[in-house]
Image: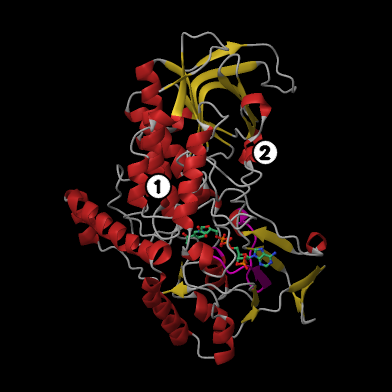
Amino acid sequence: MTSTLETQPAAAPGPAAAAVREVRVAIIGSGFAGLGMAIALRRRGEHDFVVLERADDVGGTWRDNTYPGAACDVQSNLYSFSFAPNPDWPRSYSEQPEIQAYLQATADRFGVREHCVFGADVTSARWDDASRRWQVRTTAGEFRAQVLVSAAGALADPTYPDIPGLDGFAGTVMHSARWDDSHDLTSEKVAVIGTGASAIQVVPAIQPIVDSVAVYQRTPAWVVPRTDHPVKPLMRTLYRFVPGLQRAVRSALYLFREFLVIGMAKQRRFLKPVAKLARTHLHRQVRDPKLRAALTPDYTIGCKRILISNDYFPAVAAPNAELVTAGIAEVREHSIVDRDGIERPTDTIVLATGFHVTDLPIAEKICGRGGTSLAEVWSDGMVSNRSSTVAGFPNLFLLVGPNVGVGHTSMVYMIESQVAYVDDALQTMDAEGLEVLETTEQAQQAYRDLIAEKSKGTVWLAGGCASWYLDKHGHNTTLWPDFTFRFRRLTRTLDRENYVGTPAAAPAGTPEVAA
Ligand code: N01
């Protein structure tokens, strides 16, 4: 059970500074990862935990990304929790409102909402060696937790481009992940900067209503057809009454998508049919050879995320749309000037410019032994043991941390693998009476070497593109570079030999014992 303790006032003044809530586990974030972790705890009877959520609802990236056209590019039968299938998905690929509703309903169904503290933006989380607890400060008060699970997400904090003059723009500027639903784009002159997964959904959704849309492309994307379709009522009924059928569909989708790993990580020639499919798609949808050439990528397919859309190319080819490839020279009060010197009047700028992925902002707030922050430890690139723990950060677990991202399949599969790993770690602590569990430098180095070895020759490193998958040194610190079932195997149970544990009874300062 959770409890509230009175402690010494914290250094930073604030209304909630004096009351510290004591919990066994504090989870940061309530997206798929945070909810998945919370549900796992609930399902085995653990109630002593909180979910710290900076917003006022669950959902994470699916709550935040409300831009027009927002949808998932993985089929919902796969992009959902394995233990909570939804027979009522209206389409094969769901849109943002349905996914958000699913997450809300799942949180309610498993009783997670009562553990959520909304409006709790984590400002700092510090490991205290003396008390063997995490001291977590949030905008909704202070918490002391034995275990901290960061499920803050990799696609949580938008990046804002450093474009000359952007600050002085007199019109509206919106990031795709911070959409202003009250702003009406009808008959406006809109600029969309970026051509990633978000942009290719925004552009076709707004093109029919705006006066004009200029799409500022730095690098063209590989785009394949979207085989989306409504799920017929009969199928939904079958899913409801024959759950095995939906599980079979899920497995088939999983296996089909896993084939892409062969091309991306093993033998790039297997990507050739996918590239052919994308070229044919472009050829069919764009008649103008000049526009087609501008939309044709010059790097290997898969190097950046492969996008799926049936309406992006037609939208860019529409009479009121323009693809701008010259690059942006500057933004003026009411216009954007490209590097060819062409000035385009602009009412609204949409920044579809992505997220802080290799430089996660949460890493600056989490400080381990000796007050060292994760960001400092990761200044030369993110490292971890099994994408989940970091040496020097006792009792800290990361979900959707380093090298767990996937470009070809459902992130929920990876999240469930990690949740099982963390849950096994917690159960191991219980079983062995451990108060502290910490991975070793050696285990971290071995995992780093494993990732480097697996990444060699992959399309992400050798595909001839720049992407958010790679850090500033060109290292893969974000993606799991192999079949996802191998990650699941690696994280099925805690690799106890790679951890040092401290028994609960041992006084602070007692040397820790290895497995
Ligand atoms: O962001 P991105 P996103 N000047 O980083 C361009 C997931 N997601 O929000 O390619 C000009 O992919 C940048 O150009 P370049 C999915 O995992 C999923 O679209 O670097 N342009 C690029 O075109 C995805 O991968 C779904 O040359 C600038 C774009 O902005 C991830 O989120 C939907 C620039 C950023 O693309 C992120 O996708 C949406 C600058 N200064 C998102 N800076 C679905 O499931 C950046 N760019 C469908």
Instruction: Report if the beta carbon of the residue with label 1 is closer than 8 angstroms to ligand 1.
Output: no
Q: Describe residue 340's horizontal placement relative to residue 195 as left or right.
A: right
Q: Earlier in the sequence, mark 2 or mark 1?
A: 2
Majority secondary structure in the magenta region: loop
Q: Position of residue 228 (x, y in %)?
A: 36, 68
Residue 285 shown in magenta: no
Q: CA distance from mark 2 to mark 1?
A: 26 Å
Colouring style? secondary structure
Question: On the image, numbered disc 1 is attached to which residue?
Answer: 414
Asked whether residue 69 appears in the rendered view, the answer is: no
Instruction: Label 2: state its secondary structure.
Output: helix
Q: Amino acid at mark 2?
A: Glu
Q: What percent of the width, then of the height, locates residue 307? A: 47, 68
Residue at x-position 63% and y-position 57%: 182
Q: Quadrant of the C terminus?
A: top left
Q: Is residue 515 visible?
A: yes
Q: What type is the residue that disc 1 sits on?
A: Met
> Viewer-proximal residue, 261 or 43?
261
**Quadrant location of the N terminus?**
top left
Number of residues whose C-alpha sits closer than 10 Å to that of mark 2, classed few (under 14), some (14–19) or many (20 or more): few
Q: Which residues are magenta?
A: 178-198
Quarter, ligand 1:
bottom right
- Residue 82 disc label: none
Give the structural element (helix, strand or loop) at label 1: helix
Q: Is residue 192 magenta?
A: yes
Residue under label 2, please give it: 376
